[in-house]
Amino acid sequence: MAIKETFFISHGSPMLAIDDSSPAHSFLSTFQEKVLPEKPKAILIVSAHYETSDPMVTAVSGPNETIYDFYGFPKKLYKIKVDEKTRGLDHGAWVALSLMFPAADVPVCELSVQGNVYGGDHHFRVGRALAPLKDDGVLIIGSGSATHNLNLIDRRRPDAEVSAWAKEFDGWIAAALAEGRREDVIDFMRRAPHASAAHPRAEHFYPLHVALGAAGENATAERIHDEWSHGTISYASYRFTETPKG
């Protein structure tokens, strides 16, 4: 079974795992039913919260531990367990996967990003190298955030009006992907408006580059979820679909 699609998911706050009032929660909860064509044999998830100097993947022989790499949230959130045969999954992985695959019946491997060392071109090329995994039924998911500046969010109001700079950056990325302007996306820190405000550090955006690279040379992009929180946090998620040449 070959898989023709890769995905980028904006995982947002860890609260997404238990906040069923969020549209993003509903989107991920119905992912298998409404978005995914068929169940994959395995999942490779690229998490913004797993940073290393060189690409690394998780692999252990026993059940994983759920890594609670955050603080100050309700106790209910710390009781979530992810029963997978892999290394402990950080919240960049398990928040999304606990909703997308609640039965935890698909093997998962997590891949790191190199946000402190390399840029968009490196992560895109990592994705290109991983593309053959799709032929073996492996679903490749990038998990990060379309915008990620925790210093500029309106913590008092989840429904705050979206800041103009955040909307402009998010719209520019969506247009660049839809129009196939791959080089613009790869070099977004220099080309996109308000890039440094949207991503003071780019580790939350590089999972998109991996998913884009893994999609294939002729892949098309489609935004499959659009939502805002706290005035600056975009939950935009994308599907990249391989298309035949010619």
Image (tube, helix red, strand yellow):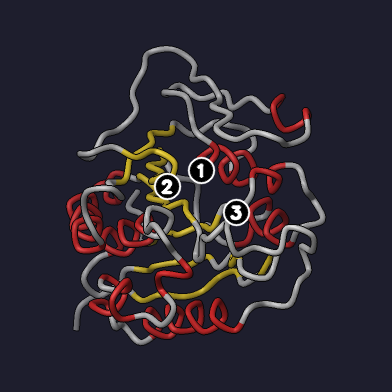
Most foreground residue, 163 or 46: 163
Residue at 43 percent of width and 33 percent of height: 108
Give the image location of residue 69, x and y in percent: 55, 32
Quadrant of residue 103 in the image?
top right
Give the image location of residue 151, x and y in percent: 57, 58
In the picture of the structure, the residue carrying the numbered disc 1 is: 92
Residue at 33 percent of width and 23 percent of height: 59
Left or right position of 171 against 12: left
Residues under labels 2 and 1: Cα distance?
6 Å
Q: Is residue 101 above or below residue 240?
A: above
Q: Earlier in the sequence, mark 2 or mark 3?
A: 3
Q: Residue 48: which disc?
A: 2
Left or right position of 15 against 140: right
Give the image location of residue 23, x and y in percent: 73, 62
Q: Is residue 148 above or below residue 86?
A: below
Left or right position of 174 against 75: left
Tags 2 and 1 touching, CB below 8 Å: yes
Q: Amino acid at mark 2?
A: Ala
Secondary structure found at label 2: strand
Secondary structure found at label 1: helix
Q: Amino acid at mark 3?
A: Gly
In the picture of the structure, the residue carrying the numbered disc 3 is: 12
Q: Amino acid at mark 1?
A: Gly
Q: Is residue 55 above or below residue 168?
A: above
Left or right position of 140 against 214: right
Tags 2 and 3 touching, CB below 8 Å: no
Q: Residue 121: which disc?
A: none
